[in-house]
Image (spheres, rainbow, N blue to C red):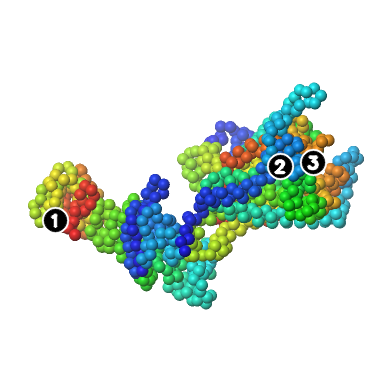
Amino acid sequence: MTIELKNLTKRFGDLTAVDQVNFDVGDGEVLCLLGPSGCGKTTTLRMIAGLEYATEGDVILQGKRVNELAPRDRNVAMSFQFYALYPSLSVADNLAFPLHAEGLSASEIDARVKKISDTLQLGGILKRTPGQLAEGEKQRVAVGRSIIRDPMCFLFDEPLSRLDVQLREEMRGEIKEVLQDLSRPTVIVTHDQLEALTMADRIAVMRDGRVEQVDTPHNVFQRPTNLFVAGFIGTPQMNLLPATFTESKGDGIAQFAVQGGQSMTIQVDRRIEELSPGTNVTLGIRPRNLEISRESAEDGISTVIDMVEPMGAETLIHLNDGHQDLRLVTDWRIPHAEGDKVHTRFPPHATHVFTEDEQVLRTQ
Amino acid sequence: MANENSRTGGFGAWLLDPKRRGALLVTPAITILFVMNIFPLLWSFGLSFFNYRASSLKVPTFRGLSNYERVLTDDKVWERFQTTAIIVGSSVILQLIVGFLLALMFAKAFPMRRIVLMLVLTPMMLSFVSVGVFFKLFYEPTFGVVSYLLSNFSDDRFVVLGTPAGAIAGIVIADAWMWSPFVMLLVLAGLVSVPKYLYEAAEIDRASSWRRFWTITFPYIKSLLLLAVLFRTIETFKLFDIVYIITEGGPGSSTETIAVYLYRTAFQFFRTSQSSALAYIVLFIVVVLTNLYLYAVNRRAEEVD
Amino acid sequence: MARRYREIGKAGWGYTLITSIVGLIYFSPVLWIILTAFKTRTDALAVPPKLFFTPTLENFTSVFYRSSITTGTSQSTDMALYFFNSIFIAGTSVGLALIVGTLAAYAFSRYPLRGNDTYLFIILTTRMMPPIVVIIPIFLMFRLSGLAGSYWGIILLYTAFNIPFSVWLVKSFFDELNPEIEDAARMDGASESRVFFKFCIPQILAGLSATFVFGLILTWNEFLFALLLTGVETRTVPVAMARTLGGEVGVDYGLLAAIVTLFLLPIFFVTFLLQNQLLRGVTFGTVKK
């Protein structure tokens, strides 16, 4: 069983909310739609469910084009951002609600409700109504209601966004566990990258209605295909430095001039040789990959420590050379003081090069 | 805040003291209400214990509870209450059904909704006098549209207002036609307050439209329906103008509501004190209904929170 | 199979057609009255009733001018004055009730008195009571005080009738506001009147207009008190309407229909403009935005 989207597009009047989206989700696979708010991820999810109609393109479930089908005929399960629990029904009745359309007997329904409430530890609150539940309980009921049937696929819209941090961490694990037992394609919409990185088999990063990259959490983090994904994924944010490529020295070793006139020679992807000297590029390096030393070196620039932010086990250091800011994460044990002059070092292959069209330069 | 008032001093400062702000703001409203409503109310309460007749110059004498006794033992009064109950009951039920169906119809957003909605709202804006006069014309056996349309189905000229049942139906239809839009507005307000995502969830959960109505829609409108029932009951209880114009209480006294009877006692027979006593009994019933109404309002407020 | 699902709560022009038909059926008695306004006396009482006829404006002319049979000259009726009276009296009293009611509602909402709920209950009861209960004392009171037949008398009376609903409705709107904003404004040194006028009132403007429409609809057509308490100079249209009913030749339906039609126009347009607010008003503001 699969979900396939082909050139899926949604326009509201002049506004293109979703623009030519393509991806597929395999059986038992969890795909996270990740992006800032307003990027079209919820609209995409609603088009899979059938709550919105595609302006162009196809939604294919199980190999069958379902564009024209009403949600009820698509056999999908969905949990809503605001949970959408039926306020007048008890928790047990809420859970049983999707089963009425299945034509099950009362005892079968009871058995299923029992099973789900055991899985999600809802036994103690089955008689309550949604108004009497805590946020976390509501969320569990919403999940329970969406997984009680055996549908074609599961859709979750921002399942954890209304929970507080601690509860969110707890539920993340719980949902992940539940999802592993369901061998159905699952799509989760979220704006929280940590949620996506931990729960997803693959992540589709979206911006302005377009999918920027679809890949495993590891690859989205380690091998971003463009400037947006590079900047969006990862905390603290990747350092992005505008620079000019000046000279190639072979084997991916190249010289760049950064703003302010300093230059450095670092090893990057080999495709740098395709560029002609004088091309403007953006260099990206994660704060955890950047190193500093007291001695001057070729593979970095000299800066001054602007601010030191202890973050527990690590320390976040803000560097500035008068033209650009750099962020760097180091072990807390290494002492640094604001105002110290230091040299940065860009280790081999740690730097991503983005060309002017914002695409990464990388050998596949 | 204190120095705000220190400039005025004396009585002004005393009056503008924040402690008295609530009372000060309420005063104009209470004063007008007292002069125009509460004082006359007490006056007529007093009258109900005398044998005052507005038509005579005799000095009224104190009669104690005898007016109440006379009213409560009067078979006529009980008959009028029965008539009122029948008219109020059937009119309110009709208003509920029609208003509810209209509300379901207008709960959707569709092009030109604002304009089409006005078609339905207009009856509410007509005066009782005009509704009374024209419905009487519609029911008129010779010139009336209703009789004309009904004559297509039967050979006889149909005299709508000729029988007690027909006359009651005639009044009920006119009143329900006028006020169903009000019920519609109430129910509509309930319908539009249902969060859209609940309907979406029901669609995903493949609920039948029957089940969807009872689990989602109805819980959101039930207290508003109760509100509508009570408000319309209280208002219809006072129904006077339409009855007076369409049937004048006839044929016989079959459509004479308590309000019409009250009017006759007071202005045709000039039994002023007796009518005051009866009015107080009516007021008592209305107060009970008002209490129920408030209960409904409060429940609605709680549900929305 | 391909049951195309419409976005919930939306419908197209086909639906407009269906609702228009239902709406027109519901509207048909009003339509008939409007049509009657354009009929001659013969057409108005034709057997069988006429749907198609040659329209005439005669009725509308005779609302304002009456031709005298003896002299042949036309003479102005006082109907223009009655229209003015209706608009002036209803507008002023509903407006006055709104102002007085808003002040009281603010107090009930923000500075609860001892026995707050009792006051509110008594206020509502005065609106629910049958008018006939107080009509005799009011009549006597007006005669004794000389208020009978004056603008002030009837305006004050209508104001009193509108205060209860104004207080209840507006209070529910005030209750919905977040008092933190007011406290924040007070912390910033805003005076009490500034808090009231600059922070509270602008936020409930929609509610105030709903209250206004609601009151206007209920006051516009009031008949009983107007009949007893207005004089020749202050007579309102419903009373004038009822007075056309008498006469030896029976009811002049065309003329009455013309008055009804003209009298419907102002309230119709006010309601049309403030339709969305009215929806909020009838539910005591319990429907959140």
The picture places residue A276, in percent across and down from the top left corner, at: 13, 47
Q: Residue at x 21, y 51 (%)?
A: A354
Q: Amino acid at mark 3?
A: Pro
Q: Quadrant of the C terminus of chain A?
A: bottom left
In terms of secondary structure, where does tag 3 sit?
A: helix
Q: Nearer the viewer, mark 3 or mark 2?
A: 2
Q: Which mark is residue A252?
A: none
Splitting the image into 4 quarters, where does residue A285 fall? bottom left
- Crowding at dot 1, Cα within 10 Å, few <14 / some 14-19 / many 20+, comes out as some
Task: Residue under label 1, please give it.
Answer: A270
In this rendering, position of residue A64 left or right of residue B43:
left
Distance Cα–Cα, label 3 vs label 2: 47 Å
Residue pictured at 44% horizontal, 58% vertical:
A51
Question: What amino acid type is highlighted by mark number 1?
Answer: Arg
Q: Nearer the viewer, residue C120 or B77?
A: B77
Residue B196 in picture, x, y percent from top left: 50, 56
Residue type beneath disc 2 = Lys
